[in-house]
Amino acid sequence: MSVASSLGLIDSHAHIQGSEFAADVQAVIDHALAAGVEKIIVVGGAGDLSSNYAAVALAQSHSGLFATVGMHPHDAKTVSEEDWNRLQELTRQRKVVAVGETGLDFYYNHSPRQTQMDLFCRFIQMAQETGLPLVVHDRDAHQEIADLLRNHGAGKVEGVIHCFTGDDAAAKKFLDLGFYLSFSGIITFKNAGPLRDVVKKAPLDRILIETDSPYLAPVPHRGKRNEPAFVRIVAETVAEVKGIPLEEAAQITSQNASTLFSLPT
């Protein structure tokens, strides 16, 4: 067995059910396996309800894939009660392991802020009711997300702040709430020194790694379509920053993802 195939990496956040992968998704999955990626969390909620159905269907057709269901904060203003009822039904589907992607995006503000917050609170409640963890999108809304999680889900909801880009203070807020921090290919960017410092200080047993495919490809693939195989580069960067072997970074981050998402071993 090669070193790559034995790493057992988990890409904790990928959107490979999207149109960007329609022509070659099986090849992308095979490429990931060859790079040492054992499992992929296929995240719903990007665009409209169809992305959730596609995520679940893809996960159910491959043994190493699992799905999440939710709605991105960009689309909060378009979510109807019928959509909500269908999402609730999807949480009961086989291989659905989390609620999300949900959260707040106060950078683009594609949906009104109050609408985003109202929907996020409903998803926090959904996580409580289903016992599933939350996959949280946080863009320029660290304090607001921490406050909502504390006020509506403290001690009752666990989850991950995906593609974390905050500072030490924001990291502490979420860690104190029992959440994991997931780091993406952004940590490989030349100007990401401050974020690498956050990685260095964060407890290894609270770190997940992800690609957010097809977005945010790491160096040296920056600007190209991202894919789950490249999560290995994220793991290598975490290992370098932490001063530990790649195998240790892979093993611990994968154990963290397995624990959070209750994945089979």
Image (tube, grey):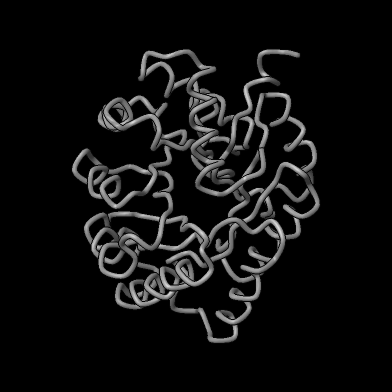
Position above or below: 50 against 28 = below
Residue 264 in percent (x, y) is at 66, 43
Quadrant for the C terminus in the image: top right
In depth, the one of 79 and 10 nearer the eye is 10
Position above or below: 171 against 83 = above
Q: Residue at x 58, y 30 (%)?
A: 230
110 vs 260, left or right, is: left
Circle count = 0
Q: Residue at x 39, y 70 (%)?
A: 120
The image quadrant of residue 46 is bottom right
In depth, the one of 143 and 21 nearer the eye is 143
Quadrant for the N terminus in the image: top right
Residue 238 in percent (x, y) is at 42, 24
Residue 34 in percent (x, y) is at 73, 24
Residue, far left: 169
Position above or below: 213 against 236 = below
Q: Residue at x 59, y 44 (%)?
A: 214
Q: Residue at x 30, y 62 (%)?
A: 154
39 vs 118, left or right, is: right
In depth, the one of 254 and 108 nearer the eye is 254
Residue 233 in percent (x, y) is at 52, 24
Residue, far bottom: 81
